[in-house]
Image (tube, grey):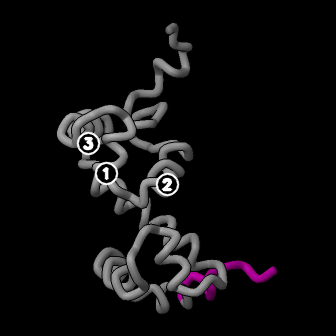
Amino acid sequence: MSLTKRQKAIDRTGSPRPGKPDPAFIKELLEVEFSVTKLARARGLSLRQFERKFNAQFQRCPRVAAQEIRMTLACERLLSDAPLKRIAAELGYNDAANFSNAFQFYHGVSPSRMRLKLLNLAPRV
């Protein structure tokens, strides 16, 4: 089976260029509910092999990168009127409390407070 140039450019971590995951990788993270173990298995790699390859390309471990992406997506979703419970479920959290705790740990502010802050900064349409 022959690979195209694009397929060769995309390594097994899912990103066509170093440093920034592509939308397909983000979609895949959502599908596996941000489980790095499931992501590694889907690529036919052991967890450790996946971590080494990912770290070589992005200079950070996949769990940290997944958390960064997850928190970025959380901020984007806070701009909607979706309840926190639904946002938590979309991002693979078991419940809104776990999401809220992780969000507060990462951003230093609760999701509710961040939503108010973001909505006050968002342009009015």
Distance between the alpha carbons at the discs numbered 2 and 1: 11 Å
Please state which amino acid type lies under the numbered disc 1.
Answer: Val
Q: How many marks?
A: 3
Distance between the alpha carbons at the discs numbered 3 and 2: 24 Å
Q: Which residue is mark 2?
A: 31
Q: Residues within 10 Å of mark 3 (few under 14, many from 20)?
A: few
Split into 4 quadrants, where in the image is the C terminus? bottom right
Q: Which residue is mark 1?
A: 36
In the image, farthest residue toward the right: 125
Location of residue 68 by image quarter = bottom left
Q: Which residue is mark 3?
A: 59
Location of residue 95 by image quarter = bottom left
The answer to whether residue 113 is above or below residue 29 is below
Q: Residue at x 72, y 79 (%)?
A: 123
Q: Residue at x 39, y 39 (%)?
A: 42
The percent coordinates of residue 51 (x first, y second) are 23, 41
Q: Which residues are magenta?
A: 117-125
